[in-house]
Image: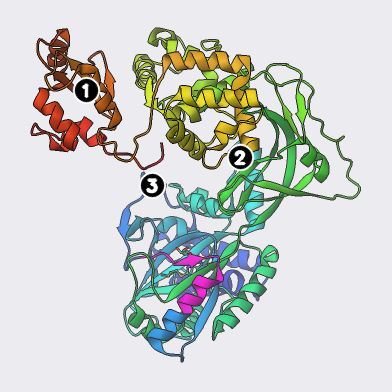
């Protein structure tokens, strides 16, 4: 045993190992061989094994092996971990700079840093020892993942005090990352053992941090960069540059690409340089962060509850990625267009995992010469569907033969018809794929809005043969549904009820729900307010057929000759016409309210004789103001107007709890709308009567 006994030797070994760990993991500048390091490590382990009382929590041997937790503790942050104001455009960055100059004058400076795409974490050092690590959580409190953070070799368990005094309390903000190479190796390992891979390095880092068993985290190749002091007991460094320097001196890993920048020009130059080298960086970044250098000035500009006003994240524009195209599958949409869909090896694009893209049509596939098995570049801009931009040449690699559009519909086997670059399945209503698509569309939010009739259910109903034609939807019975997989009594009755409720709907919704080519939500609304009844619209479309130019349709805002022609041609098809007839028999579309329609949305039943006018006259007056006059009383009835010798309708009104008006009430209604009635006028019907301006 060395002089001074085991305690002294253990201390010496710890110090030595800590130093070499720091040189290796933080500075990336090892001074001894891996073998020598392992030798020292083994010696310390052996010493601690024979003298367990010598083990300290900060011993380099204590990075692995803590017992699994049952759950993470929720811990409040030392100071709120705010988010960042961000944009990918230059203008908001310029405005940020202007705000800073306005508040502080022109004598300001920034520090620009790579914006690391990892998991944000708070590290707390008390008396120089790592005491806790907390995930960002909601910014106020997060999960205590101290044991997991301890397994990251570049995280010092004890701060270095050699070059700078260590404050009693130091709370830091850092980003846990996984290097791209390590991420890929980890995913390969996961796949080998039949486990789900991570979508991107950020998820891998965050997922690895949230392991209840620290031994799993220890086996994950995590790294960390520290970039901010959240709280300090003592005087903080005066600038961001000094902060980064202090962090380095305490032995913490600081990103080596942080730079001072004087103004927007220098910021943009930094950004350009970083972006240029982005693909060569061994870790993922999603932009740069610009921070006011002067810490005291930060207090002057302050913060919102969301982000500090002294920092700004300038994000990179959406990324393009390269992946492999696995298969091209033709997919039949609701309108019969057969679209080639690219199935690709999943790839992360601007925070989203992409595995499919629309290849639009067979000409596009041919033009780009995209084949199964090719390497392709994909792009995602905003939230639009990803695009396959191009294929990447792989010299020497044998390619599959060009992709060809099938000649028969993959869903129903009907011979496909080319129309320009597109390909159609002509079997509009019997093709199962189109039928399911049409049913889903009819039930969609802007159409009849039938809750519970989504893509899956529509496909199921068609696949199981419960629906063979669109109007069958209105004959569905709960008992039939309950026999289908995934339906229970409640879901079955709910769907039938939702379908029933759709039997009266706004005209625009009905028109849109028919899935007429070219008729989207806006056009449907224009058609409804122009024609006011479905029959008038249909007649106008049929006139177009006769004149072969759809003139009456073209009077509608936004409808040109080509659109009119499409609408006319679609409605004139015998199979369309038959389905529309049947649907019309099931659904009652109501005209949209017009300006001055004070009674819009009201359903009124007249019964008994009136003194001041005849019943039919009263009906006309009510209808002229937008009310709907019906002959039978139901729960949907807003008012029953009861004159002399009312019939059974009065009784029905009473049993349904429908409000009853006498002739005076009718006159008030005609004069001033429902608001004029002295009776309680806050019935739901009255409230609903306000003309709707929103989307159908
Ligand atoms: S400073 C209050 N600097 O970006 C200011 N954040 O989108 C604290 N991030 O949650 C943030 N690199 O996790 C800062 N060099 C850097 C960063 C950085 C990555 C993360 C951070 C934050 C997120 C905001």
Q: Secondary structure at mark 3?
A: loop
Nearer to us of marks 2 and 3 is 2
Of residues 508 and 316, the one drawn nearer to the viewer in this rendering: 508
- Give the CA distance from mark 2 to mark 3: 67 Å
Q: Where is residue 364, by image quadrant?
A: top right
- Give the CA distance from mark 3 to mark 1: 76 Å
Q: Indicate left or right for 121 with 623 as reference.
A: right
Which residue is under mark 2?
560
Q: Secondary structure at mark 2?
A: loop
Asked whether the residues under the numbered discs 1 and 2 touch, taking CB atoms below 8 Å apart as contact, a structural biologist would say no
Which residue is under mark 3?
69
Quarter of the C terminus within the rendering? top left
Q: Earlier in the sequence, mark 1 or mark 2?
A: 2
Residue 157 x/y as whole percent: 45, 68
Looking at the rendering, the stretch of residues picked out in magenta corresponds to 81-97
Nearer to us of marks 1 and 2 is 1
Q: Indicate left or right for 261 with 359 as reference.
A: left
Give the residue displayed 79% in from the left and 38% down from the top.
363
């Amino acid at each position: 045993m060395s002089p001074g006994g085991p305690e002294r030797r253990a201390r010496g070994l710890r110090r030595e190992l800590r130093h070499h760990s720091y040189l290796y993991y933080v500075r990336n500048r090892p001074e001894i061989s891996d073998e020598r390091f392992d030798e020292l490590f083994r010696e310390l382990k052996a010493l601690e094994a024979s003298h367990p009382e010598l083990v300290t929590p900060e011993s380099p041997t204590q990075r692995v092996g803590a017992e699994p937790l049952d759950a993470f503790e929720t811990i409040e942050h030392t100071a709120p971990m705010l988010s960042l104001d961000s944009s990918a455009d230059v203008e908001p960055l310029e405005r940020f700079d202007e705000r800073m100059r306005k508040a502080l004058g022109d004598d300001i400076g920034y520090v620009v840093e790579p914006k690391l795409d990892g998991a944000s974490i708070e590290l707390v050092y008390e008396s120089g020892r790592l005491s806790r690590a907390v995930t960002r959580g909601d910014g106020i409190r997060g999960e205590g993942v101290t044991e997991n953070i301890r397994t990251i070799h570049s995280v010092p368990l004890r701060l270095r005090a050699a070059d700078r005094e260590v404050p009693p309390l130091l709370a830091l903000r850092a980003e846990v990352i996984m290097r791209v190479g390590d991420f890929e190796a980890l995913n390969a390992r996961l796949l080998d053992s039949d486990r789900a891979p991570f979508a991107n390095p950020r998820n891998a880092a965050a997922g690895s941090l949230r392991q209840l068993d620290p031994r799993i985290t220890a086996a994950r190749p995590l790294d960390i960069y520290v970039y901010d002091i959240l709280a300090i007991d003592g005087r903080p460094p005066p600038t961001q540059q000094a902060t980064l320097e202090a962090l380095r001196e305490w032995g913490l890993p600081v990103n080596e690409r942080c730079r001072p920048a004087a103004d927007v020009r220098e910021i943009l130059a930094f950004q350009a340089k970083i972006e240029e080298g982005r693909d060569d960086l061994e870790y993922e970044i999603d932009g740069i962060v610009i921070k006011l250098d002067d810490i005291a000035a930060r207090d002057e500009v302050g913060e919102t509850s969301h982000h500090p006003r002294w920092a700004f994240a300038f994000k990179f524009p959406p990324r393009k990625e390269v992946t492999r195209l696995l298969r091209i599958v033709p997919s039949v949409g609701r309108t019969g267009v057969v679209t080639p869909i690219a199935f690709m090896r999943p790839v992360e694009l601007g925070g989203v995992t992409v595995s499919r893209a629309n290849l639009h049509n067979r000409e596009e596939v041919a033009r780009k010469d995209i084949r199964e098995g090719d390497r392709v570049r994909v792009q995602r801009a905003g939230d639009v569907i990803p695009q396959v931009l191009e294929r990447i040449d792989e010299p020497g690699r044998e390619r599959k033969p060009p992709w060809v559009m099938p000649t028969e519909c993959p869903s129903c086997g009907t011979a496909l018809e080319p129309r320009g670059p597109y390909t159609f399945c002509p079997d509009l209503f019997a093709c199962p794929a189109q039928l399911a698509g049409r049913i889903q569309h009819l039930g969609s939010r802007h159409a009849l809005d039938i809750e519970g009739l989504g893509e899956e259910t529509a496909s199921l109903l068609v696949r199981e043969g419960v629906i063979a034609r669109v109007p069958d939807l209105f004959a569905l019975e709960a008992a039939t549904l309950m026999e289908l997989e995934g339906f229970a009594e409640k879901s079955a009755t709910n769907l039938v009820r939702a379908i029933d409720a759709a039997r009266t709907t706004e005209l625009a919704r009905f028109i849109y729900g028919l899935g007429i080519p070219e008729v989207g939500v806006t056009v449907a609304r224009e058609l409804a307010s122009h024609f006011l009844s479905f029959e008038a619209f249909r007649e106008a479309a049929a006139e177009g057929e006769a004149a072969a130019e759809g003139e009456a349709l073209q009077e509608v805002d936004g409808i040109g000759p080509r659109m009119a022609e499409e609408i006319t041609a679609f409605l004139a098809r015998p199979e369309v016409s038959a389905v529309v007839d049947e649907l019309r028999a099931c659904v009652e579309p109501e005209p949209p309210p017009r300006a001055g329609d004070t009674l819009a949305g009201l359903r009124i039943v007249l019964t008994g004789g009136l003194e001041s006018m005849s019943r039919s006259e009263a009906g006309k007056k009510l209808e002229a103001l937008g009310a709907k006059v019906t002959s039978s009383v139901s729960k949907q009835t807003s008012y029953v107007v009861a004159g002399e010798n009312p019939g059974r309708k009065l009784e029905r009104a009473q049993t349904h709890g429908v409000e009853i008006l006498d002739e005076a009430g009718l006159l008030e209604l005609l004069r001033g709308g429902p608001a004029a009635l002295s009776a309680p006028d806050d019935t739901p019907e009255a409230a609903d009567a306000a003309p709707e301006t929103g989307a159908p």
